[in-house]
Amino acid sequence: MTLKQVVTYVFRRKGGVIPISEFVFALSLDLKWFSPDQAESVLKSAEKNELVKITEDLVEPLFDIGAIEVPIDFRPDQSILEEKTLTIFDQVVERLSTVKSKPEIIRMINEEQECLRIVEPDAVALLIARKLGVDVADLIDGAYQQLIR
């Protein structure tokens, strides 16, 4: 939740759609929470987590900033820089682990990848999930977007 609170805090101070530079300056110079490089990392992490949309040089939130609680004395700790997002592959493996062991899942994905000659492991993992009846519909669009980038 901390990353979402950081993003919320910036947009509440600066407005709904702001230039990338203003977002970075808010985190580094105005609030003095991060260095400029760290602030850029926070922004990239927010984009990966689909909290913000970056178009050209503008940043806009993808959630209702009014719905997020941010304490008055809020100050993020540096662990926010260490937050890792799970890849689509990791998310699929995590869901598949409810029906099979992780080593078995990885073996199945590798075998299917060789058999189908599909290079993209995310696509193969999604196929295996569908075969095993595990719901991954919410991950398909994200996988597609990564493929076309």
Image (cartoon, rainbow, N blue to C red):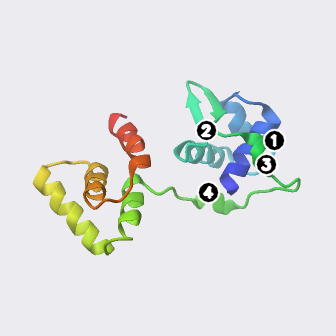
Element assignment for label 1:
helix
Q: Amino acid at mark 4?
A: Leu
User: Which residue is label 1 attached to?
Assistant: 30
N-terminal-most mark, 4 or 1: 1
Report the disc number at residue 81: 4
The residue drawn where x is 34% and y is 34% is: 148
Q: Earlier in the sequence, mark 2 or mark 4?
A: 2
Q: Are marks 3 and 1 in contact (CB under 8 Å)?
A: yes
Q: Residues within 10 Å of mark 3 (few under 14, many from 20)?
A: few
User: What is the CA distance from the residue labelled 3 to the residue labelled 2?
Assistant: 21 Å
Residue 42 at x, y = what percent? 62, 48
Indicate the quadrant where residue 8 lies: top right
What amino acid type is highlighted by mark number 1? Asp
Q: Which residue is mark 3?
A: 32
Which residue appears at 61% of the width and 43% of the height?
A: 51
Look at 42% across and 43% down and name the residue there.
142
To which quarter of the image does residue 50 belong? top right
